[in-house]
Amino acid sequence: MILSIPNLDTLAVIPVVFNAGAAVLPALLGALASVVTLLFKPKELFAACKRRPLVPLALILVGTAIFFWVRHTPAAAAPGRLVRETASSGSGHDWAAVAMEIIRQEARAKALGGAKVEAVEETGVASKEGAAIQFRGDAGRAGYLGGSSPVGLVPLWEYSEDGAMFFSSVLVHGGKVYGASAFLDPSGSFGTIFCLDAETGEEIWVTDTGGPNSDEDLMGFFSSPSITADGKNLLIGQGLHPDFGASLLCLDTATGRINWAVKTPLHVESSPAIEGDIVVVGAGAVEKGADHKPQGDPKGEGHPGYVFGVRISDGKELWQHQVNDPESSPVIRDGIAYIGSGINGSAVVAIRIAPDEELGGKPREVWRTPTPFPASGPTTIAGDLILIGCGAGDFVFTSENPEGMVIAMDHATGEIRWEAKMPSTILGAIAVRDGIAICPVRNGEVIALDLNAEGKELWRARVHKSSPVMAGPAFTGSHVYAVSSDGYLAVIDGKNGKVLESVYINDPGKPGELGLSISSPLVAGGRLYVGSETGGVRCYVGK
C-alpha cells in the first residue's frame, strides 16, 4: 500500500495536539534510524564502539525502550476522533496514522502562523438572556453565538466515527460541543450522541444505547440538539425518515445519561424547541409510493404525524396535536409554537404549548395558514413575522419543474404579509440578522432578502456549481457560511454576496457520493463548527 499525502497546506483534518506517545515518536524514530544504520554498517559500528565503549550499551537501551514502548502503548488516534475497535484491528498499531498526525500537526502550526485563537465563549443573544440554546442558536436561526467571523479558514480539529454521517447540526454551550451521528444499515439506522471539548475536539462522553435499562442501539439522527436554559438537559429527536418507533430523548449534559425517552410510532427528525419546562417537537410521517400515502410499521396502520409537548423535568407527555408530517423544526414565542406541515399538509400551524388544564377553554390551535408547497423547513422568527421556506422538492429528489417560495406571516394571526419566489425549494433554516434573511436554495444558491422591503432580493451567491444548498447558513452580519450538499463550505461577504473562499469539508479520500452534507454550520467564539457526510465534525478558525 502506498500512502499518498496531499499538499499539507490544504489538509482538511488537523488536530490541535497529539498524545504523549506521539510527541516522543520523532526522537524514538530518529534513534531507531541511527541504530538500523549502524547495524547495516559493521565497520562504522566497530569504530563507534572502539571510540565510545558506551555505544553498545546505549544501543541496547534504546532498542529495549523502543520495544517496550511499542509493546505497551495503546494504538494512537487523533484527539477528537472516536476509534471503535474491530475484529480486524486486534492489538496492532496504525503507525501510518501516527505519522500522519505528526505531519498534520506540523501543517497546522505552519498554517496558523501564530494567529490568535479566541477562547470559546458564546456571547449570542440566547446566552445573554439566559434562554435555552436551540437549533441554529435561537429563533432567528442565524447559527451565530458570538465572537468574530473567521475568514481564511484553518482546520483546528476533527471528530469522526468510522462509517458515520453527520446530518445533525452541532450546538456549542459552556465550552462543549454537542452533536449526533447517523449510520445507515440495510436493517435500519443507528447513531450516537456525543459531547466534545470545544477547544480540542476531545471526546468527553458518547451515548449509543437507550440508557441504563436498555442495550438497544439508538437510531440515526437527523434532528439537532437543544439545551435547556440551565445547561443541564439536552433534548434531541431520534430516527431517520424510514424509521418507526423513534423517541424524543432527554440527556444529562454532564454525563450523557438518558434521563427519559418519549416514544412515538414514527420518527422525530424535527429539532426540539424549548420554552420554560416544556419542549415541543414534531413526529413526521413515513410516506411511500407515488401518492405519498403515510405508511405504518408491520404492526400498525399508517400515521400522518403529529406535534407533541413534553414536560422536561419529568418526561411526561402533556399533549398531542394533529399536524400532517411535521418534520419542520418549530420555534416558540410567548407560549405559542410555530411549525410547518410537510407532505399532505402544506401549511404553517400555530399551537399553544400549555398543558390541557392550563388552556382555560382556549383551543390548542391558534391559526393554520396554507402554503403552496409542503413546508418542511424550520420556522424562523423575525420581529413580528414568522418566516418559512417551502417548495416542490425534498432532501432526496428535486422537482421536474423546480420552484419554491419564502413566506412571511403575521405571528399573531397567520396572515401572509409578503411572499418571495425562489428558483427552487427552501429546505434549510432561513437565517435572520440585522433585518436581512439569508435563504438556502436547492438550486445551489443562497439568496439575501431585505426584511424591511417586503423580501426584496439584495444579492445571490452560488456555493459550488449546481450542488443543492439544503443546510441552513450561518450569518454573523458581516459573513455568511453556507454548505453545498457535495461538501463545500463557502464564506460569503454578507454585504454584497461575493464568495471569499471555499473549503472542502468531506474526507478528500472518501468524497460524499450521496450528496448529504446537510449539517448546518455554527459560529461561536470566533470558530466555525460543521458536520459533513464523510468528513466528520470539524472546527475551523480564521488565519
Image (cartoon, rainbow, N blue to C red):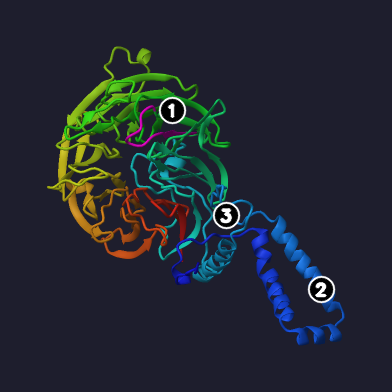
Q: Which amino acid does label 3 sit on?
A: Pro
User: In the drawing, what numbered circle is on residue 222?
Assistant: none
Q: Quadrant of residue 365?
A: top left
Q: Nearer the viewer, mark 2 or mark 3?
A: 2
Nearer the N terminus, badge 1 or badge 3?
3
Q: Alpha-carbon neighbours of circle 3 within 10 Å: few (<14), some, or many (≥20)?
A: many
User: In the drawing, what numbered circle is on residue 79?
Assistant: 3
Q: How far apart are marks 2 and 3 (CA)?
A: 33 Å
- Percent x, y of residue 55: 82, 78
Q: Nearer the viewer, mark 1 or mark 3?
A: 3
Q: Is residue 478 visible?
A: no
Furthest-left residue in this view: 401
Q: What residue type is labelled 2?
A: Ala
In the displayed structure image, the side of residue 59 where residue 303 appears, left or right: left
Q: Do the residues labelled 1 and 3 touch (CB within 8 Å)?
A: no
- Percent x, y of residue 451: 22, 46
Q: Alpha-carbon neighbours of circle 2 within 10 Å: few (<14), some, or many (≥20)?
A: few
- Percent x, y of residue 246: 39, 29
Q: Mark 2 points at which residue?
A: 58
Q: Is residue 534 visible?
A: yes
Mark 2: which secondary structure?
helix
In the displayed structure image, the side of residue 196 where residue 490 appears, left or right: left
Residue drawn at 37 percent across, 58 percent down:
511
In the rendered structure, which segment of residues is drawn in magenta? 234-245
Q: Name the residue under label 1.
A: 276
Q: Distance between the residues labelled 1 and 3?
A: 36 Å
